[in-house]
Image (cartoon, helix red, strand yellow):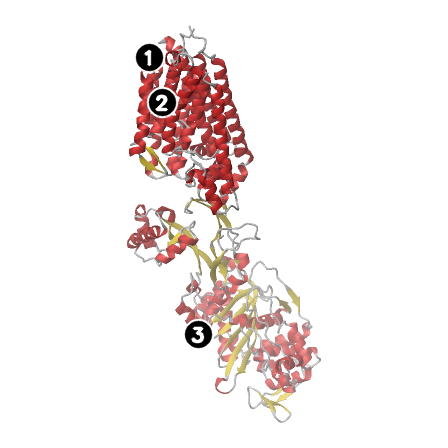
Amino acid sequence: MWKVENPVPSALPACALTAAAILLGLTVLAVRLRVEQLDNSSERNSEMKQQSERRVLTAGARGRILAAGGEPLAVNRPTMSIVLNPGAFQSAGRSATVSNICEAIEAAERTVGRASKLTARDIERHLERALALPLVVWSDVDEGEFSRFAEHSEQFAGLDCVEGYERSYPGGSLAAQLVGYVGRERVEAQAGDKRFHYRDFEMRGRAGLEYYYDSYLRGVPGEQIVLVDARGFPCARREAIRPQSGPDLELTLELPLQRAVERQLSGLKGACVVLDPQTGGVLAMASAPAFDLNDFVPVLSQEKYDALATDAGKPLLNRACGATYAPGSTFKPVIALAALGAGVDARARYECTGAFTIGDRFRIRCARTWGHGELDLRLALKESCNSYFCWIGCETGTNAIVRAAHAFVLGAKSGIDCPNDLPGVVPDEEWKRAHYAERWYPGDLAQISIGQGMLLVTPLQMARVIGAIGTGRLVKPRLNAETPVQMSRLPFPDAHLDIVREGLRLVVSRTGTGYRGAEGVQATVMGKTGTAEVGRGASRRKNTWFVAYAKGTDASRAEARDREVAVAMVVECGESGGGTTAPRVCEILKFFFNGPAVAGGAQ
Amino acid sequence: MKKLLGNFNWPLFASMLALIAIGALTIRSAGAVRSAVFHDMWLSTLQTSLFGLAVYLTLAFSDYRNYFSWFALPVYAFSLVLLVLVLLVGKSMMGGTRWLWFFQPSEIAKPCVLVFLAEVFGRREELFPGRFRFRGFLFAAAAAGLPALLIVLEPDLGTALALAPAVVAVLLAAGVWRKGLVVLLAVGMLAATAVLTAVYEAEKPGVDDARRERILEYVPLKPHQVKRVKTFLFPESDQMASGYNLRQARMAIGSGGLWGKGYGKAETNQLKYLPPAVSMNDFIFCVWAEEQGYMGSLLLLALFGVLALSCVHAAYVAADFRGRLFAIGAATLVFAHVYVNIAMSIGLVPITGLPLPFISLGRTFLITMMSALGIVQSISIHREEIT
């Protein structure tokens, strides 16, 4: 049928060859794909992650600051913000995208009823620097704005509500200098192995306990992963690591008492510390004038900052432990203990003639210019006789007095857990030489014997001193309720302490200088007045003190129990310790021991 | 009818349907995250495939010997006319004039050339009495070379080259002048080597621009083709421009791993790192491979294997010579596309704009491929009369 020249080739070789070529091709592909998809898989995956994943370090919620019993001093107030997802407004070219976003914001402004602070420049910067993150259009919208937005939210594709939180201080100015305030900073990466593309803002303590306990209160940061598309716009986000809230800080502070203390200080310049002398727990710590902590949220405005910074009353200053004053006569119990330790007889009498003179130029006058007459130690404490204390001070000597002061940890930081813990000054020969390049005169000794001269203490230190005299034990003051109690015995014999205590009880007796410090208080009270003169000439003024120790039944709580308190209050530019300060401390003690109703009536 | 169904090549038919289904699914996944235009592409692909199926069944159940003779020359001539037309009035898109109204003539031309060659060689007794081998070779070179030349002019070198294996396979099966074939293959390989070497020399690091220009003057490639060859030779260079697609493709395929990321979860596509123009066309394999992993890749390779080998089987059992030639040509044509398409997305061959049969978006190619397989099915069904 076929001619010889053109035989039909057999089907088998051609088909076999084609099939073989196909199988070979399939094998090559299968092997190469195995290498690509299995062997190189993890490498390709990490390449892809590098390309499309943006890691964001997110902030954990800050812990709260609570007073004893859980009453809040600093909390996180939930807020609503309206944010914009730039990805929904993508357009060819950045400027077209920016104008899309501007239009969307303008449209939403009419509904929300508040103008956004964003400018086209801000939007452009956001697109340049933080494209993968949502753009906050309105932070912290109020309820009306939120509900108006939510009602019409379907009109605003690409805009979204997100929850956040803002620091809030329910007490307002309550314990303001102590609690402190926060600022905003980028979250710090934990011991840095990972690199992040973006870091959120978190609150960072700037003052007070917010500053001191900042690392404690701060939450553990989390990690969010944002998937970005080829143009860098965010497409999806997931939480790789949940941020954790910081722990709450519970204080020893008792808010009802704190309020009572602040009421007593209102309108004045001064400070007051109430200490539990058995545990060292600070029950109240107030400094006046104060300021509203909520002014610092979210940021302090320039006018308010100027007002605070130029206020003559220095409201930002925590006078309770961050300011020093001459203790005046409240230092006399320390002198008494030093003198007893140095062998001065408590029953020895000294005739006060109204002044104490050294040589013919140096002269210290007594409050009673005509003199107290003959006094022993107890009476001298009761009358707060300057001449007597100058006399036993000179008898005792500088070194013994300084030792006694150091025994009460004066001239050193108290170790309380808050910033601005000032040490004050207990001067001695060496100190004077170093600071004034002058020798130590007997006059200096006489000055510190009545708590004046170069001697400086903080109200906190004085509360600690009077508490230690009351209990015989020196405690380390503390604010954090969880800090263990630290105390040590005073290096003075009980007999000496009893003599001083007796004298201090006389102070608040009907005829004592501080009789107005304990009138009607249902507790055993001992106290000491102080009136320290500072400044010269026109700026001469008196800082008036009252320190008190009281033991009785705490009536400010539901379950009554025996409690002790040590109070130190200083009022700048007062009349006298007994007249200005003692009655205020008395009110505080009444509040504590007689029950709030009584104090409220007295108010 | 019973006889027709008895010879029906089920693997050929079933693998084609499976591939079309996979294609529609992948197009749907690739288009889902795009703008609305792309959302229903998968549906229109399915509609097109219904039309293709009608053509397929018509061609399959009619005896190919009845229609081959009369339509071989017209379809060949028709495809030549279209190829000329596209050069004259075609739409220019992405560096080439490939579109005539709504279809690409070059895609139609490929099976038409095969039909024509099969018909002519099947009737070699009449057409080349006596010395078939040499004249057949010359004829084939001319018959395939003319449309190839027109396609190169578009320019679409890849499509033209994709035709070459099929033509070579048909010539081999037809038993034409083997020495000529060997020479042709040798010349082709030499040319390819020369081009690769020249581009390598011109583009390797540290070559100054003057020398580069001088070398490239002798390389008969368009600038974008030179770039593709360069990307193939130096995949690390130039990652943001021509190397970008390759880098994204390899990332997509590689990150798929063993089991893939799941349907609709191809990140490279979702996040638009692969431009939609390529993720639904030339690089659609990446979307599938990222979603379904190595297992999915193997499934796809297996389906293509079944399809191509079923064609070879049809060739083996074909009733006559032209049937055998066409079936072998069709098998090679399909597989050449599959091989080049997948190989280019893993950097095994330079990037060429070849679609993946039945998977890539493209109605012209889908219909012509289904028609070609319809003829192969007919060859398989009407096999009885072989002696």
Q: Does the residue at mark 1 contact the one at mark 3 (Cβ under 8 Å)? A: no
Which residue does the image show at 48% across and 31% down from the upper left? B191
Q: Amino acid at mark 3?
A: Thr
Mark 1 to mark 2: distance in Å?
17 Å
Q: Which subunit holds the residue at mark 1?
A: B
Taking the image as shown, residue A146 lies to the left or right of residue A376, namely left
* Residue B26 visible, this angle: yes
Which kind of residue does numbered mark 1 sit on? Asn
Residue beneath disc 3: A310
Considering the image in quadrants, where does the N terminus of chain A appear?
top left
Between the C-alphas of marks 3 and 2, the distance is 93 Å
Estimate how packed mark 1 is, as few (under 14), some (14 to 19) or many (20 or more) residues with alpha carbons within 10 Å. few
The residue beneath circle 2 is B112
Disc 3 secondary structure class: helix
The answer to whether residue A169 is above or below residue B12 is below
The verdict on a common chain for dots 1 and 2 is yes
- Residue A127's place in the image compared with B135, above or below, is below
Q: Is residue A99 left or right of residue B268?
A: left
Q: In what element is the residue under mark 2?
A: helix
Residue B344, how many percent across, how many down? Answer: 47, 33
Q: Within the image, what quadrant is residue B274 found in?
A: top left
How many angstroms separate mark 1 from mark 3 (CA)?
A: 106 Å
Please state which of residues B53 and A252 is positioned toward the viewer in this rendering.
Answer: B53
Q: Quadrant of the C terminus of chain A?
A: bottom left
Q: Which residue is mark 1?
A: B66
Q: Earlier in the sequence, mark 1 or mark 2?
A: 1
- Residue A239, above or below A180: above
Q: Amino acid at mark 2?
A: Cys
Q: Chain of mark 3?
A: A
Residue B366 placement: quadrant: top left
